[in-house]
Each structure stands twice: as C-alpha cells, then as structure tokens.
Image (spheres, rainbow, N blue to C red):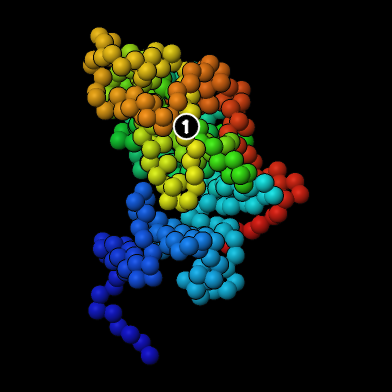
Amino acid sequence: MVCKLKKSLYGLKQANGQWYDKLASSLHSEGYKHSDSDYSLFYRKKGSSLVFVAIYVDDIILTGTDVSEINSLVQDKGLGKLHYFLGLEILYRHDGALISQTKFTSDLLKEFDVLNCKVTTSPLDYTEKLKATDGKLLPDPTYYRKLVGKLNFLTNTRTDIAYSVQHLSQFMQTPREPHLKASYHVLRYLKQDPTLGIFISNKPDLTVSAYCDSDWAACPDSKKFVSGYLVLMEDSPISWKSKKQAIVSLSSAEAEYRVVRQVVGELVWLERLLDELTVKCSLPIHVHFDSQAAVHIAKNSVFHERTKHIEIDCHFVRSKLQQGFITLHHISTDSQLADIFTKALTGVKHTTPLSKFSVLTSNLRGGDETTQSN
C-alpha cells in the first residue's frame, strides 16, 4: 500500500516546532517536567527514581537511576552507553569520559586540503593583527563563512580554539585574504592533534570554580575588549566562552569587572541547573581573575568617581559577593587559565594551561575501555 501525502511535514518552517510540541506533550503525559534552566531538558523525579531526557530536534539522550523507566521510554532493552551524539564522540575510561570530535576534525582537514601542510603550535599568529579592511576581498565569501562556521561547531569540544574562532567570526560580512590565511592557520594547528577533546572526570568531588580574563581595547577596529571565562567542575571544563563585548570600556579595571559580571551570571544559571540535576553545588564558588582593581570595585560599597559610569547591572557581582554565592580571588597572570580565551599566544603559552583543565588526546587510552561510535 502507498500513502499519498497532501502536505509534507519535512522542509516546512513549522516542522521543528510541531515535532517538539508533540514530543513535549507526550513526555508531560508521562509525568515529565520542563527544566526551568534549559528548555531542551525534561526530568521526572519520583522518590529515589530520577530520569533525565535531553533533546535536540530528534536526537535524544536518556540518563538517570531508573533503568526500567528508560527502557520503557525507548522500548529497547539493548540500550547501552552513549557513544555518539551530534558529532560528539564519547570515549569511556576508568576515571571518566573523553568527549571529542575526532572524525569531524579529520573530515574538516580533508575537505579543506590541509593534510599535507605543516602544523603550527598555536591557533593564531600572535604577531599578526587582523583588521576588517586590510587585504584583498575574497571572490567567494561563502567559502570563508563555511570554514568558520564549521570551526565554530568544533569549539563544542575544542576550548583551545575558542578565541581564534571568535576572532575570525568578526570578519564574516566582508572576508579578505588575510582572514582566510588566518583560518588556514587554525586548520594547521588542528592537524597537530585532531583527537584532542575535553575530559569529564567521574571523581566524587563536584567543586565548581571559575576563571575569567579580558584583553582591554583588543579589537583594533572598534577598541572594544575581548572577554573570556572558563568554569570548571573540579578539573573538568563544563562551560567556557570567548566574546568581543558590545561596550567600549574606559579602563582595564572596568573591562575586568564586566567580565566578572558575565561569569557570575553564568554561575547563577549553572547553580540552578545543577540543582535540577540533583547535584549539590557547594557555596561559595571561587572566581579567579588577575585584576586587583576589579576586586576592590566589587568589594567597595562606595560608589566613587572611578565607577559611577559603570552600569548598575554590573554591581550585581557585589550583591552575590555579599550573599556568599561567590568569593573573589586575585591570581597572577601566569596562573590565569582563561588567558587563552582573550588573546593569541605563543605555542608554549597556549599549550601550558590546557592540561590544567583536562584537555586531553583520545589517543592516550592506555588500558581503558575502547569504544566505537554508533
């Protein structure tokens, strides 16, 4: 028998919304609730039974303590460990799991024909300053946009190229030859070790800490600063970002203070999400940065001449500090793990902090379990 469709669901603008509404209503009928922190997360808690459902369009991850409930949801008794999800490869070890995009990286290097090129030790040349109007315009800007778009997807597991991709994304509108050359520099860096990924430890210590940094007036065109932060659970990275800010800061202290506000906002959201996941987040959370002036601004309740131009929303850092949600700690620049999210560095300075927040290669499995992607 053949069924003729009057209208195809696939390809319509409302297809994703209709699918999500249908799936959500089905889960709600089974007693699942939406997460208040992430709308793609559903959960059901009944006594000691916990089941979590994470959804991205039609790709779903199930986890929890109630195996029978999970099996009943998918009607598949042979359900096993997660090995592959949205291009992310999960390799299990005795002390945790390594999440990488090895196949995606290898395919990317092959697609843009850099397998025979020499490798580099850092994602960007720290001696070169890219500008929006320097160099000859590319005849086909879509080529550059496609490459940077794929590099952006790779930052889901490659924290080491977050700043580079953020920087190259500034030139998407009118890309030029120096911008394309710099993007190929990133590919040559990836060729050095395509298997690099983030390691999530299974240690019982779930202490959350954060590092944040900024590079004042880093953009040569707009003079805006670049901020970066890294949130760790013990030594495992769980959240990070490199971003050029929309506001021009009048001083390096203001730039540092603004990035602290940004990371504290991330920590507030993260603490709520962990609470829904029944993970107890011990307070206060330690926030590390390398500006003594920003520490004084956060701790000083006097609204003096140096800070009266800063927007009120930035001072919610002070309220969270007074509530005991965070503590602020000054560290030396050499100990600043977020430095690689704000500027291009030499090969040695770029590589040194990676091992401190569990950026590892999947080739070093040792005697651990070897898994294949589904």
Q: 283 and 233: which one is in front?
A: 283
Rendered view: 48 above or below 261: below
Q: 141 and 256: which one is in front?
A: 256
Q: Is residue 364 left or right of residue 109?
A: right
User: In the image, residue 133 lies at what x, y percent?
Assistant: 31, 24
Q: In what quadrant of the picture does the C terminus appear? A: bottom right
| Residue density around tag 1, few if under 14, some if 14–19, many if 20 or more, within 10 Å | many
The residue singled out by tag 1 in the image is: 285
Residue sitting farthest toward the bottom: 1
Q: Hey, what amino acid is under mark 1?
A: Ile
Rendered view: 73 above or below 128: below
**Which residue is rendered at x = 55% and y = 57% of the image?**
84
Q: In what quadrant of the picture does the N terminus appear? A: bottom left
**Which residue is rendered at x = 37% and y = 26% of the image?**
322
**Which residue is rendered at x = 30% and y = 35% of the image?**
173
Rendered view: 179 above or below 95: above
Q: 67 and 372: which one is in front?
A: 67
- Residue 247 in view here: yes
Rendered view: 21 above or below 189: below
**Which residue is rendered at x = 46% and y = 39% of the image?**
239
User: In the image, residue 105 lies at what x, y percent?
Assistant: 55, 45
Residue sitting farthest toward the right: 367
User: In the image, residue 286 lies at what x, y percent?
Assistant: 48, 28
User: In the image, residue 134 lies at what x, y percent?
Assistant: 35, 22
Q: 29 and 125: which one is in front?
A: 29
Helix, strand, or loop for circle 1?
Answer: strand
Q: Is residue 328 left or right of residue 119?
A: left
